């Protein structure tokens, strides 16, 4: 036993469909048996323990559950885990390197881009999708790219500054 | 945590495969495209199905904007974002660009498709108004081949279309006519929300006179509606502020809004008139190469 307890799982009833999925999550291939009705957000959080992906509204409105799906920002509460089979998913846990923060994370730290932090993982991934495509965005372009992500705390001002900070840092990194 | 009832899932590998599955499984099966209307409904259990047939792998076949001499063809799996970013559509039908800027948000636009939008047939669906304005036709494929249905015949009521149980929408076609342009106006309660009212307009001109005009309104009736009376009133007349106001008055008269959490019927009627004026004005300016 790898810990002090082990949950004994009841076998799944025979008439409930189950599918095996293989998803590359943050560069690592993860395989799981899932019911087709399982949402990607729930597989990430409950199945794989990657609780950095938050679920806020659960109704496709807030963007807290944003992850990258084959490099594009999507709402993981509105995609089935089976739909991600064979695809690549990046969550906030995939941003930092082994020893240092990702420049986007540094930006949020430096520019005070968060208060409670609930929206932050989603914001950072929406920002990553933007900067991967457009390394030098204007303030307007940042606001536009983040317009599907809601924040109840910051008033957005510092979030936008954080992303612009990260854009500068990433550019100076790639220049040197 | 919102979870749909249990269902089985299969990925379609071709249009024929998808239609074959629909035919075999019957009305308990549904296609899932972007999933941004279907999955929220299933999570709330407003809709329950036993099978979902995922057509996202058909994006490489059905995700396209093709320009031909007399028409533009758009594949059913073309995503909102691709419509927003298409230079061909911006040139020929700027109404798409106007509308896509105000449909949902970038995350939803990365997934939602034109096919899903039309087949959802929500009375507030913006792309339905765009397609109505542009007099589009829908290509519907079934076991026995294809048929083409004009937008005017596509909607059968709220959330109901001409697409049958074992059928699939594969393409939307837009006739290209010279000397025309188009525009879209929407009022929503906040960014990314559905319309309180939205309005598309397209005009064609010759020698300073309107040869044809079309208006499509969303969120003010059971389905997005084209308004033939506006076309009739405007043909053969030179554009003017008064004429736009006349078109607006017809729109307000014609539509059938209801009072709901987005606004009173009276307010929506006011918007229908005002947005028709604005969209007409902008479309006419664009015919003359000007941007308002
Ligand atoms: C937060 C949010 C905000 C939104 N705001 C707006 C807005 O402001 N304006 C607006 O217009 N829309 C809005 N939408 C809806 C959005 O545009 C959806 O993407 C769209 O309604 C459905 O497209 P889809 O590809 O996701 O369809 P799905 O949800 O996959 O499918 C919808 C329906 O169409 C059927 N279907 C899909 N494709 C086909 C096909 N090829 N042939 C036959 N049947 C098919 C499905 O079986 C299902 O019944 C919003 C959605 C969300 C989640
Ligand atoms: S939890 Fe997915 S959009 Fe809010
Ligand atoms: S920091 Fe609290 S919701 Fe954004």
Image (cartoon, grey):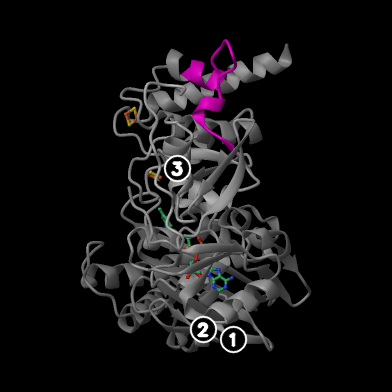
Q: Specify which label sits upstream in the sequence, 1 or 2.
A: 1
Q: How many marks?
A: 3
Tell me the mark number nearer the camera, choosing from 3 and 1: 3
Q: B38 above or below B142?
A: above
* Badge 1 density bin: few <14, some 14–19, many ≥20, Cα 10 Å: some
Q: Mark 3 falls on what kind of element?
A: helix
Quarter of image, res B46:
bottom left
Give the residue drawn at x 43%, y 29%: A52
Circle 3/circle 2 CB separation < 8 Å = no
The magenta segment is A89-107
Give the residue drawn at x 38%, y 32%: A119
Q: A67 above or below A102?
A: below
Ligand 1 within 8 Å, label 1 CB: no
Q: Given the current orientation, which residue lies at the most extreme right position? A: B69
Give the residue drawn at x 47%, y 45%: A75
Q: Nearer the viewer, residue B230 or B155?
A: B155
Q: Nearer the viewer, residue A90 or B111?
A: A90
Quarter of image, res B80:
bottom right
Q: Chain of mark 2?
A: B
Report which residue position mark 2 lands on: B154
Residue B63 in the figure: left or right of residue A167 = right
The alpha-carbon separation of the residues under discs 1 and 2 comes to: 6 Å
Circle 1/circle 2 CB separation < 8 Å = yes
Q: x, y percentage for residue B222?
A: 35, 79
């Amino acid at each position: 036993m790898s810990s002090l307890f082990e949950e004994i799982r009841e076998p799944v009833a025979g008439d409930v469909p189950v599918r095996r999925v293989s998803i590359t999550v943050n560069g690592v291939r993860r395989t799981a048996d899932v019911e087709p009705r399982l949402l990607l957000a729930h597989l990430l959080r409950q199945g794989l323990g990657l609780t950095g992906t938050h679920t806020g509204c659960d109704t496709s409105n807030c963007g807290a559950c944003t992850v990258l799906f084959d490099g594009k920002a999507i709402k993981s509460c509105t995609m089935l885990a089976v739909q991600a089979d064979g695809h690549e998913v990046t969550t906030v846990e995939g941003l930092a390197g082994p020893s240092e923060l990702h420049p986007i994370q540094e930006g949020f730290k430096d520019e005070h881009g968060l208060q409670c932090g609930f929206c932050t993982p989603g914001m950072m991934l929406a920002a990553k999708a933007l900067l991967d495509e457009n390394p030098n965005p204007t303030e307007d372009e940042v606001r536009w790219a983040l317009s599907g992500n809601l924040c109840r705390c910051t008033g957005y001002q510092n979030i936008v500054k954080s992303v612009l900070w990260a854009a500068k840092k990433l550019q100076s990194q790639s220049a040197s | 945590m919102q979870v749909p009832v249990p269902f089985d899932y299969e990925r379609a590998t071709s249009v024929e495969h998808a239609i074959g599955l629909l035919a075999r499984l019957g009305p308990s099966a549904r296609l899932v495209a972007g999933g941004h209307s279907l999955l929220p409904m299933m999570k709330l259990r407003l809709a329950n199905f036993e099978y979902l047939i995922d057509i996202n792998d058909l994006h490489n076949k059905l995700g396209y904007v093709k320009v031909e001499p007399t028409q533009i063809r758009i594949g059913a799996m073309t995503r909102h974002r691709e419509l927003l970013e298409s230079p061909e559509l911006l040139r020929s039908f700027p109404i798409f660009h106007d509308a896509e800027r105000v449909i949902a948000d970038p995350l939803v636009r990365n997934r939602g498709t034109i096919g899903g939008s039309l087949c959802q047939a929500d009375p507030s669906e913006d792309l339905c108004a765009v397609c109505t304005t542009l007099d589009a036709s829908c290509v519907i494929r079934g076991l026995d081949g294809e048929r083409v249905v004009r937008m005017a015949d596509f909607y059968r009521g709220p959330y109901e279309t001409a697409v049958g149980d074992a059928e699939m929408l594969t393409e939307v076609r837009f006739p290209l006519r010279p000397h025309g342009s188009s525009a879209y106006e929407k009022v929503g309660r906040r960014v990314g929300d559905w319309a309180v009212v939205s309005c598309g307009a397209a005009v064609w001109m010759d020698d300073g006179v309107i040869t044809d005009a079309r208006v499509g309104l969303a969120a003010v009736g059971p389905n997005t509606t084209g308004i033939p009376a506006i076309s009739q009133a405007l043909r053969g007349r030179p554009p003017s502020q008064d004429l736009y106001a006349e078109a607006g008055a017809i729109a307000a008269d014609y539509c059938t809004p209801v009072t709901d959490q987005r606004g009173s019927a009276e307010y929506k009627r006011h918007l229908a008139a005002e947005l028709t004026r604005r969209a007409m004005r902008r479309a006419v300016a664009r015919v003359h190469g000007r941007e308002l």
